[in-house]
Amino acid sequence: MKRTLMLATAVAFGTFTSLASASGLPPLEQKERYKVGFSQMESNNPWRIAETKSFHDTAESCGWDLIATDAAGSAAKQVADVDSMIAQGIDVLFLPPREEKPLIPAVKKAKAAGIPTFLVDRSVDPNAAKAGEDFVAFLGSDFIDQGRRVAEWTIENFKGDKAVIVELEGTTGSSPANDRKKGFDDRILQDERFEIVASQSGDFARDLGRQVMETLLQAHPDVNVVYAHNDEMAIGAIQALELAGRKPGEDVLIVSIDGTRDALQAIIDGKMGVTVESSPFFGPLACETMKRYAAGETIEPWVQVKDRIFTPENAAKHIDEAY
Ligand code: AHR
């Protein structure tokens, strides 16, 4: 009630600026068009391409004059891209930070320049920058829960007595790599049939996933489960296993996260067991959250995205909507 009254007063006297300042965050005025920055980290996989497209597709209907950059896999370039957007006078910044720590100065610089920042899909180290203080909010999935759900499915569906697991990790120092590892490892190791014999980064990339799998296969020829932190590395692992004469889906179970078209096809083909969804379609949610913020709402620190799970039971039903 008190808050409603405060908002009504703010509307009447145009004092949103002071409301936002009270929280320490830069305000955002309500207007027809916004100059919006979207700083993509790389474009080397279908997930990233779908995310960037989602921002472009949303731009016109949300009144965005969009400046989109591509850091080509370099956190240093992503920091420089944000600098350049600040210099160009953006009103709002949407930022998927490639890694948890290196992008923190960029977040703080945007705030100091009076630009409200929304982290999308990945987050930063919460000990160094906080939602509601340094940036408005984090929009994204629960990566720990994604890893845990993959583990639950694997425990229920692995048929043998002893599972020898190779884990292909995402980009070192990124929030999805840290959290997907934690969620999966904590749950799977509660069941004594499961052992993780190797865990190495494939940088969320198909080709590196394939190369890492080739190497790990030589050291661990008895591997019978591969957990990849994303579908691209899972597909790379399938290629490496097939090249070595193994039969993914028969003598080795592949489990992963994202929900790309290639992964759903691999499930339909019987080569992959499961992929837990991680949606890249952030444009509409970014628009809605930005407008709520401009209208004076206090945004929850974590605007959480709910994810589905794709298995042999439903992959065919969903493949046409995949990317
Ligand atoms: O941050 C989300 C992850 O990053 C996706 O799983 C992956 O495919 C992307 O590169």
Image (cartoon, rainbow, N blue to C red):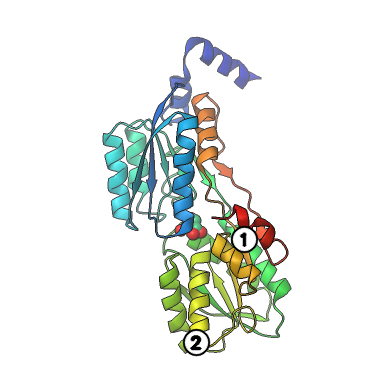
The image quarter containing residue 265 is bottom right
- Check disc 1 and give the amino acid type: Val
Who's the residue at 37% across and 45% down the image?
39
Residue 32: image x %, image y %? Answer: 45, 22
Relative depth, front residue between 54 and 213: 54
Q: Which mark is residue 276?
A: 1
Residue 30: image x %, image y %? Answer: 46, 21
C-alpha separation, residue under disc 1 versus residue under disc 2: 27 Å
- Check disc 2 and give the amino acid type: Ala
Outermost residue toward the top? 12
Q: Report crowding for label 2: few under 14, some 14 to 19, many 20 or more residues within 10 A (C-alpha).
A: few
The image quarter containing residue 301 is top right
Q: Which mark is residue 244?
A: 2
Q: Report crowding for label 1: few under 14, some 14 to 19, many 20 or more residues within 10 A (C-alpha).
A: many
Residue 235: image x %, image y %? Answer: 51, 71
Badge 2 element: loop
